[in-house]
Amino acid sequence: MSENQTELEEEYEPTGEDSVAEHIHALDDAEAERRAESLRAGLEDYELDEEDAALLAHELGDYDDEAPLRLDPVLAIVGRPNVGKSTLVNRILGRREAVVEDTPGVTRDRVMYSATWNGTNFTLVDTGGWEHDARGIHARVADQAEAAVDLADAVLLVVDATVGATATDEAIVRMLRRKKKPVILIANKVDDIQNEADAAALWSLGFGEPMPVSALHGRGTADMLDRAVELMPEFSEHGGLERSGGPRRVALIGRPNVGKSSLLNKLAGTERVVVDPLAGTTRDPVDEMIELGGRVWRFVDTAGIRRRQHMAQGADFYASLRTQSALEKAEVAVVLLAVDEVLSEQDVRILNLAIESGRALVLAFNKWDLLDDERRRYLEREIEQDLAHVEWAPRVNISAKTGWHKDRLVPALDRALESWDKRIPTGKLNAFLGELVAAHPHPLRGGKQPRILFGTQASSRPPRFVLFTTGFLDPGYRRFITRRLRETFGFEGTPIEVSMRVREKRGRKK
């Protein structure tokens, strides 16, 4: 079994050369469309569900440049350590995503998650797993909760019903009253009916009737989510006034002190952003309209979350929250990496957040003017090791301090966004798949060879492709198809997703 699993994870290595790209680019569009119609008709012999039919009927329409940018409503979960916030996050998501230890130094990649309840999509902001010290603990908890609440349309305040309201809970309550956001008071750890009296004692906090919940066992969570969905608007009111037309939206991200503020100042031609050698000093939300390459660009919320400068603890939380908030509102991410230091785990985590967000991507290597030959050799090795999974992203070497090569940013942004927006005609896509599979067939598995029946581009921004197949395609072979899609159609600077739907012939189901 383990050998077989290893085999399935292996990269697919094609044998011999092929002329797939040349054939596709030379193919007449009308002829390609005729062939695709024939393949589509052949799908009628297979068991398709309603979702399949809707996907096949869907033609990618043009984007309405004047349509509002609609973000899912945001639900923040706040509360002091050890009240069960992360357990509740996992319960809401239906999977184990959040770290369930509120211990100092827990490194967390994500603080925002996409969630859904009864057909309603929303974004969940988790304030668990923060770092603290013994001094000023109540204020630190409230500060961190405040950062999350600033983003939120509604708030779940989680209190441990078995302990009752503490001084830290009271600090959070005072902050929430100032914010005037809808709050649902959650009395957690009410595992059975005997504990419900504990929940009633929390009426004194002044947020109405406490909802008794057991995050661990799931008790009461359905009622809680019903209530949350009722309180949230259809779309987030945080940043929801932006429009998808006009200037393209850029998120400038990177770990603290990597040079984001210096670069923004150099691009804007003004000392708009406070720059301080102390990491993490960016405080005020920055939404800059900047002219580059003869056009205006919107650099969105690159600082984003207000954070008091004395709060050195919990910096990872704020950095993650800022990064994810900016990515949500952006179309393209510029990830800034400092070449005078070794690429860190945090650099790679931030890069992965950008990829997961589905935004177009440009890598900007800062402080390039300071690079000597020895460091350059080491850097190339680091890039090869740590950034191999984003070799498709345009690279720009710049100096944020002097503005050296800042003009190279625009062509890289344009390439990435053009790829992000790109749609492949169904005819050309299926001709490409047919030629590729004919030249490099999928390996036999158990004497069978899965076939690709039909492919369609389900969406762009980022490009997502769905393949209807007769069997499971090995991950290595799917990566091979993805790589060749990039090469053939020029998808530079955008993540692309290739998924499959395995379908059986009618009458074959047992």
Image: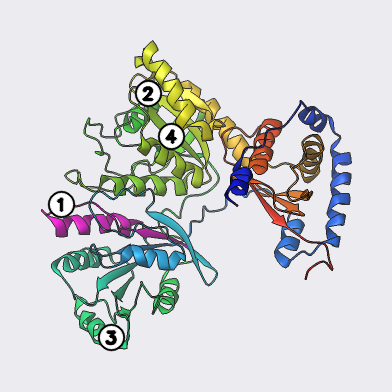
Q: Residues within 10 Å of mark 1 (few under 14, many from 20)?
A: few
Q: Are marks 3 and 1 in contact (CB under 8 Å)?
A: no
Q: Looking at numbered disc 1 in the image, what kind of residue is underneath it?
A: Asp
Residue at the spot x=61%, y=35% of the render? 418
Residue 66 picture location, percent across and down: 57, 49
- Residue corresponding to mark 1: 133
Sequence-first disc among 3 and 1: 1
Q: Nearer the viewer, mark 4 or mark 2?
A: 2
Q: Nearer the viewer, mark 1 or mark 4?
A: 1
Residue at the spot x=82%, y=62% of the render? 505
- Residue corresponding to mark 3: 196
Q: Are marks 2 and 3 in contact (CB under 8 Å)?
A: no
Q: Are marks 2 and 1 in contact (CB under 8 Å)?
A: no
Q: Looking at numbered disc 3 in the image, what kind of residue is underneath it?
A: Glu
Q: Residues within 10 Å of mark 2 (few under 14, many from 20)?
A: many
Sequence-first disc among 2 and 1: 1
- The answer for how far apart the CA atoms under marks 3 and 1 are is 33 Å
- The answer for how far apart the CA atoms under marks 3 and 4 are is 49 Å
